C-alpha cells in the first residue's frame, strides 16, 4: 500500500488517534544499540521510524543530533553499513522505515543507485531537509519511478502558496516543523501554532507529521486531533544517553 | 547560465524550507539594489570615505628586477579599512541590510578578518552583531577575537565538527533559521546558496574594476597574468572580474598546498586530485570529501584558505579552463613572504602570500615588457602572532614568555 494510504488506514483505528514516528541516528552510539532501541520502539507501538544516515555537516539539526552525527562518523559508520543495517531492520520489523539524511550522502552515492538499493531494502520514504523541490529534479523523478515517498517539510515561514507548491512534490506525508530553528529545543504550543497547523491542513490532503521539540505525553496529547503523526527525535537520543536503552520502551509506551 | 544561481553545473540554493521566504526577500532586495545605479554610487562613496578606495596599484620594482622578467604590480587590498578586501563585501551587505530594514547581523569567520570587518560595519550602522568562529580558530586568532569583542560584537566559539570555518558556517545557518525576521547573515565569501556567490562577487568586483584602469594608466596596457589566492574565492573573483572579458589575460588562482598536495594535509579543491563534486553548506561545488560524502579536515598555515569548498563561480571557470589553478605549500609561502618584506617593505597576509608564490615561480620566465598583477588580499602585520609563530622567531618567543610572566602565567 502507498505510504499515505497506509497512514490513513492506521488512523482509522479508533485506538490510534495519532501515530508516533521516532528518529534514530545510525551508528550512534552504535548499530548494536540502534538495534535494541528499535526493538523496544516497535514493541511499544511506534508506527514509523526515520533512520538518519549521518553527515558531517548537519545544518538543520540542533546540538544533540549534531553531536550524534559527528560521533557516529568518528566511530566508523559508513553509508554501506547504514544500508546493510536498514536491510536487517526492514526484514525484522513490519512497520515502515524511512531514511533521513542530507542530500550530499545521496548525491555522492548516485541518486538512482541510492533509490534502487533503498527500494530493494524496502525503505518507504526519504526526508532530505536541504533539498528543496527547485534543486531536486532528478531526485523527485527517481522518487516517483521507484515509488519511494519524497517527504517534504513545511515551516512556520511557508506561505499558503508555497505549501501548495510543496504538496505537489511531496508523497506519503508532510513533515511540519513545529517552529523555526533547529531540532531539539522545546516548542511552545500556542495560538499561533494552532493557526499554523490549520494553514498546513488547508493546503494539502496528505497526512501531517509534526516534529521539533516534541518530548512528552502532554505534547502528544496536544497534537492529537491537530496532526496525524507526532515525531519524537532528540528526546529518545538523550534518554538513551542518560538512562540507557531500557528506558526507551516505558517512555514510548507512556506517550499515548 | 541554465538556472538562476547556477554557474555551469555548480552553485544553486540547497536551503531548508524555513529559509525559503527569507531567500526570496533577499534575492529581491539584492536584484533591486544591483539594478539601481544610485546604490552602487552610495557604495563607492562609502568605500572612498570609510575605507581607502581606490586602493593603489604598486609597481614592485625591486621584485621585478630580482626575478628579471615580467613587471610585477601589486593590488593593495591590504590598505582597506581592517586591512583586507573583506571590507568591500561587508560594507556592501551592510548597505543592503539597511535597505531591508533588518537590525541584526551574523557572520562566520575563519581567520577572523571577515569577523572583524563585519563587527566594524555593525558598529557603524548600529546593528547587533554575533560572530561564529570555530573554537580552534578562536585559539589561533586571539587578537581578532579581542577586536570583535571591543567593537561590540558577541563572539561564539563553535565546538562542533572540526571546530573551523565550515563548522562556523553551519552554526551561523542554525542561528539564521531560528531568527531570520530581524537578522541578515553576512556570508563572507563567494560561496553558500544563491544569491551569495553573485552578491559577494558583485561587491568585490570593485577590485578588478579599479585594477583594470590602473594597469592601463601605469603600464599602458593589460597584464599578461593576474594572480590571486583562493580560499572561498572572494578576492580572486574580485580582481578576476576586471579581466574576465579579455581572453589575452591569463587568470591564476592559488590554493593552499599545506604540507604538499601528496600529503593529504592541504586545502586544494581544484589544483589537487582530491576534490570531487558535492553539495554542502547550501551549494554545489568541488569539495574535499571522502567517498561517502563526509567532509575532510583541511590544512593550511593560512586560516583564511583552510576550507573544504570553493566558489561555484570559480569551479565553473576552472572547468572552462578560463582560470588556471595551482597550489603553494606552507614552506613556499613563508619564503615568498620573507622575500616580499625584504625587497619591497610590504607585508602580505599569509593568505595573500600564496598568490605571490606562484607569481614568483613564473615571473622570471616572462618578458620584461610584460606585466603581471598580484592581488594582495590583506596585510600580514596584524597577524603578528601567527606569522611570528610560522617563522619560529626566537626573539618573539622570548617576548611572549616575558609577557606570560608579567601576566602571572
Image (tube, coloured by chain):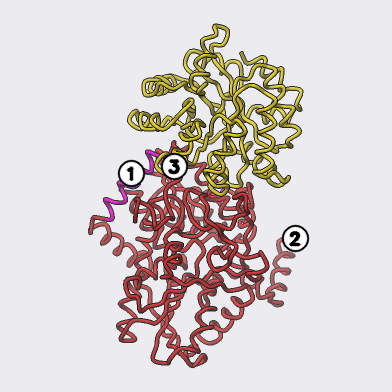
Identify the image quadrant of the C terminus of chain A. top right
- Cβ atoms at labels 3 and 2 below 8 Å apart: no
- Magenta highlight range: B20-34
Please give the residue where the numbered disc 1 appears in the rendered image. Answer: B101
Q: Nearer the viewer, mark 2 or mark 1?
A: 1
Question: Would you call the spot at circle 1 few (<14 residues within 10 Å), some (14-19), or many (20 or more)?
Answer: few
Earlier sequence position, callout 2 versus callout 1? 1
Q: Colour of chain B?
A: red
Please give the residue where the numbered disc 2 appears in the rendered image. Answer: B409
Q: How many marks?
A: 3
Chain letter for mark 3, please. Answer: A
Q: Decide whether residue B32 is among the magenta residues.
A: yes
Please give the residue where the numbered disc 3 appears in the rendered image. Answer: A136
**Spatial CA span between label 2 and label 1:** 47 Å
* Rendered location of residue A52, percent (x, y): 61, 36
The residue at the point 57 percent across, 84 percent down is B339
Say if labels 3 and 2 share a chain.
Answer: no
The residue at the point 37 percent across, 38 percent down is B21
Amino acid at each position: 500500500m502507498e505510504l499515505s494510504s497506509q497512514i490513513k488506514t492506521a488512523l482509522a483505528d479508533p485506538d490510534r488517534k495519532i501515530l508516533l514516528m521516532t528518529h534514530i541516528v545510525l551508528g550512534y552510539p552504535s548499530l548494536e544499540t540502534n538495534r535494541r532501541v528499535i526493538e523496544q520502539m516497535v514493541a511499544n507501538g511506534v508506527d514509523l521510524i526515520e533512520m538518519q544516515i549521518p553527515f558531517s555537516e548537519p545544518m538543520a539539526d540542533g546540538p544533540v543530533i549534531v553531536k550524534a552525527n559527528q560521533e557516529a562518523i568518528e566511530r566508523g559508520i559508513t553509508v554501506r553499513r547504514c544500508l546493510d543495517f536498514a536491510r536487517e531492520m526492514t526484514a525484522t520489523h513490519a512497520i515502515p522505515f524511512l531514511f533521513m539524511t542530507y542530500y550530499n550522502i545521496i548525491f555522492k552515492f548516485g541518486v538512482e543507485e541510492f533509490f534502487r538499493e533503498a527500494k530493494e531494502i524496502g525503505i518507504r520514504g526519504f526526508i532530505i531537509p536541504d533539498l528543496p523541490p527547485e534543486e531536486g529534479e532528478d531526485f523527485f523523478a527517481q522518487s516517483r519511478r521507484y515509488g519511494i515517498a519524497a517527504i517534504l517539510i513545511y515551516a512556520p515561514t511557508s506561505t499558503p502558496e508555497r505549501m501548495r507548491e510543496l504538496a505537489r512534490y511531496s508523497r506519503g506525508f508532510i513533515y511540519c516543523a513545529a517552529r523555526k530553528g533547529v531540532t531539539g529545543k522545546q516548542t511552545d504550543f500556542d495560538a499561533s501554532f494552532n493557526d499554523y497547523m490549520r494553514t498546513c491542513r488547508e493546503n494539502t490532503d496528505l497526512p501531517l507529521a509534526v516534529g521539533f521539540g516534541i518530548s512528552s505525553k502532554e505534547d502528544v496529547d496536544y497534537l492529537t486531533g491537530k496532526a496525524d503523526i507526532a515525531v519524537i527525535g532528540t528526546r529518545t537520543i538523550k534518554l538513551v544517553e542518560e538512562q540507557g536503552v531500557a528506558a526507551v520502551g516505558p517512555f514510548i509506551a507512556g506517550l499515548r | 547560465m541554465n538556472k538562476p544561481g547556477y554557474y555551469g553545473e555548480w552553485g544553486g540554493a540547497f536551503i531548508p524550507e524555513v529559509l525559503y521566504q527569507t531567500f526570496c526577500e533577499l534575492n529581491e532586495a539584492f536584484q533591486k539594489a544591483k539594478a539601481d545605479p544610485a546604490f552602487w554610487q552610495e557604495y563607492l562613496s562609502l568605500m572612498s570615505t570609510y575605507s581607502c578606495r581606490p586602493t593603489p596599484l604598486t609597481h614592485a620594482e625591486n621584485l621585478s628586477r630580482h626575478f628579471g622578467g615580467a613587471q610585477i604590480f601589486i593590488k593593495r587590498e591590504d590598505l582597506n579599512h581592517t586591512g583586507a578586501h573583506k571590507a568591500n563585501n561587508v560594507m556592501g551587505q551592510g548597505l543592503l541590510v539597511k535597505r531591508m530594514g533588518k537590525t541584526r547581523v551574523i557572520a562566520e569567520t575563519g581567520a577572523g578578518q571577515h569577523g572583524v570587518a563585519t563587527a566594524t560595519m555593525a558598529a557603524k550602522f548600529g546593528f547587533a552583531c554575533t560572530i561564529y568562529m570555530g573554537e580552534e580558530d578562536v585559539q589561533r586568532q586571539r587578537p581578532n577575537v579581542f577586536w570583535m569583542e571591543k567593537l561590540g560584537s558577541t563572539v561564539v566559539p563553535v565546538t562542533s565538527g572540526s571546530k573551523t570555518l565550515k563548522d562556523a558556517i553551519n552554526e551561523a545557518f542554525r542561528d539564521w533559521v531560528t531568527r531570520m525576521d530581524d537578522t541578515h547573515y553576512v556570508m563572507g565569501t563567494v560561496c553558500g546558496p544563491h544569491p551569495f556567490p553573485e552578491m559577494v562577487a558583485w561587491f568585490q568586483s570593485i577590485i578588478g574594476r579599479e585594477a583594470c584602469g590602473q594597469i592601463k594608466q601605469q603600464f599602458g596596457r593589460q597584464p599578461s597574468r593576474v594572480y590571486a589566492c583562493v580560499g572561498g574565492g572572494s578576492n580572486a573573483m574580485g580582481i578576476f572580474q576586471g579581466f574576465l572579458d579579455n581572453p589575452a589575460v591569463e587568470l591564476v588562482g592559488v590554493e593552499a598546498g599545506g604540507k604538499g598536495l601528496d600529503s593529504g594535509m592541504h586545502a586544494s579543491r581544484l589544483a589537487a586530485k582530491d576534490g570531487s563534486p558535492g553539495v554542502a553548506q547550501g551549494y554545489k561545488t568541488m569539495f574535499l570529501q571522502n567517498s561517502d560524502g563526509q567532509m575532510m579536515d583541511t590544512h593550511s598555515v593560512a586560516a583564511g584558505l583552510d576550507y573544504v569548498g570553493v566558489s561555484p563561480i570559480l569551479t565553473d571557470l576552472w572547468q572552462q579552463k578560463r582560470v588556471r589553478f595551482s597550489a603553494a605549500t606552507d614552506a613556499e609561502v613563508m619564503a615568498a613572504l620573507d622575500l616580499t618584506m625584504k625587497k619591497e617593505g610590504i607585508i602580505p597576509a599569509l593568505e595573500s602570500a600564496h598568490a605571490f608564490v606562484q607569481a614568483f615561480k613564473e615571473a622570471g620566465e616572462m618578458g620584461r615588457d610584460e606585466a603581471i598583477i598580484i592581488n594582495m588580499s590583506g596585510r600580514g602585520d596584524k597577524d603578528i602572532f601567527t606569522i611570528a609563530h610560522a617563522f619560529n622567531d626566537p626573539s618573539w618567543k622570548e617576548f611572549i614568555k616575558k609577557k606570560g610572566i608579567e601576566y602571572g602565567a
